[in-house]
Image: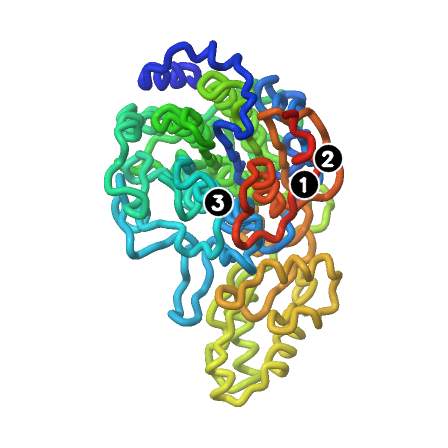
Amino acid sequence: MGSKIFNLLSALFLVVNLHAQGTSTSNNQQPKLVVGIVVDQMRYDFIYRYYDRLSDNGFKRLMRNGINCINNQYNYTPTYTGPGHASIYTGSTPAIHGITSNTWYDVQTDKSVYCTEDSTVTGVGSSGKPGMMSPRNLKATTITDQLKLATGNRSKIIGVALKDRGSILPAGHSANAAYWFDYQSGNFSTSTYYMNSLPQWVIDFNQLKFPEKYINSTWETLYPINTYVQSDIDNQPYEAPLYKDKLPVFPHKYSPEEKGSYNKLATSPYGSILTADFAIAALHGEQLGKGDVTDFLTISFSSTDYIGHAFGPNSIESEDAYLRLDLEIAKLLKALDEYVGKNNYLLFLTADHGICDIPGHSQYYKLPGKTVEKGAFTKKLNSFLNQTFPPGKYIKDFGSYQFVVDHNLLNKNNIRWEDFFDAIRMNLLQYDGVAQVVDLHHISQTMYPEFFINKIKNGINPKRSGDIFVILEPGWLTSSSTGTTHGSLYEYDSHVPLIFYGWGLPAKEITKTVHVTDIAPTLAALLHILAPSGTIGQPIPEVVDSRQK
């Protein structure tokens, strides 16, 4: 299927003599194109866990021929998709760039705010709230913005993902376009922040109607199911069945429940295929890498996240999703070789966060980890507070491991903050799975390893974060009894791959600890441009100094 789609796209854009271009080597001081790839929820160990089953032309090609930073870490918490993409491209943390979570509670308006929502814009190619998106909530510039500034606005910046936040935040404030998938129409769309009508190449791609074909397909394993020895056997009680499936087992059918609903594609390998094909379409349609200055294409593969949440990192579904994504990475690299030219593009690959093992899986193998009842952090806590203090709703919101407290109610009842926090802390520490409770107004006073406290400091923005932070013990989640999630400050959520590839970079392995906040300043150093405005990271010398000029 993938090769047929690639041939269709090649014919669509009338690309000729690409093979000859692909053999060229650039002596330019700047790459023709920078490509940033983020794989949503790709934990570091996955590329080694599945290594023997990967093709030679996808992840293996990057690992063998690129600079592989094997200890790349997130230096903040909570580790979610919005903050992850923002931090990669700003070289900063939520404390500075302001994307503290996918959604946060705004105390001034008493409502939740989605990280890329923007009521001042409307959808282009979509309707309603899914199209009302922009990067306006991002408080720092991105490496893509800085490239625009450095070239007098001549660089083309294009963002591509199924998720709006996976496209918008990397592309930055000054992007030519960010495109995301509209699950109602089955089309890639954007918003009036970028343009008033879709380019012809996007219209042409949407008219190919690939989602309609996929939605009536079945997800079978790429190889015989008994060969997936790196994963649990199919049909585990702690996996979440998809949609109307009775059991979480192969084959997974994706025929729509109702006309015009393509949500199911997200939790399937077809989402990665769509993303890669649209990215290749953008490459051709925008003629990226064909101008006099460096262009930038940002790509985020979202489906691995949806699949991982439902089935967990030890499932056959996750293994199959990565084996299939490997083929899409190979297809994308081939397209870049042919259209831009080998060594004419600079590419990096990383992830926005990792993932925790499903607690049910951990318990089966006698490992620490369970699910703590989320209601204990809302209803039960408010009930306790009403028995301890004058009646009232003291907790306004709980999300991203944080409580938002009604300070007006505290003042009205003459309750000292120190007394209130101490009462909450002593109550919550009675629950299994709660390791520590942190006063976000006095973080440094918390008795907990500084390594973790610094992650909390880096993730807290006073205008967009809560008042009290709950640290769960390793392996513990606040979620349902099936599936899993991420967001913690622990290794399984913070350790993700990072590979720099192409444009004269040698094959090398870097063992020292680097952080995702180092990616943007490293790119800035390679491109000889200013780093983003909120950067706290540092260029990685082993990458910058190793380029063969």
In front: 265, or 163?
163
* Image label count: 3
User: Taking 533 as reference, is 65 left or right?
Assistant: right
Q: Quadrant of residue 428?
A: bottom right
Q: CA distance from mark 3 to mark 1?
A: 18 Å
The label number, if any, that marks residue 146 in the structure image = 3
Distance CA(mark 1)–CA(mark 2): 10 Å
Looking at the image, do the residues carrying marks 1 and 2 touch, with CB atoms under 8 Å apart?
yes
Which picture quadrant has residue 457?
bottom right
Mark 1 neighbour class, 10 Å CA radius: few under 14, some 14 to 19, many 20 or more? some
Q: Position of residue 342 (x, y in %)?
A: 54, 19
Q: How far from the left and from the top, in percent, is residue 319?
A: 58, 29
Q: Are marks 2 and 3 in contact (CB under 8 Å)?
A: no
* In the rendered image, the vertical position of residue 415 relative to residue 96, given as above or below: below
Between 448 and 368, which is closer to the camera in this rendering? 448
Q: Secondary structure at mark 2?
A: strand
Find numbered disc 3 in the image and state the secondary structure of the residue it sits on: helix
Residue 172: numbered disc: none
Nearer the observer: mark 1 or 2; the answer is 1
Residue 10: name its quadrant: top left
The three-letter amino acid code for the residue at tag 1 is Ile
Which amino acid type corresponds to the residue marked 3 in the rendered image?
A: Gln
Q: Amino acid at mark 2?
A: Ile
- Image quadrant in which the C terminus is located: top right
Q: Residue at x 68, y 65 (%)?
A: 436
Instruction: Say the numbered circle drawn on residue 540.
Output: 1
Q: Residue at x 55, y 64 (%)?
A: 402
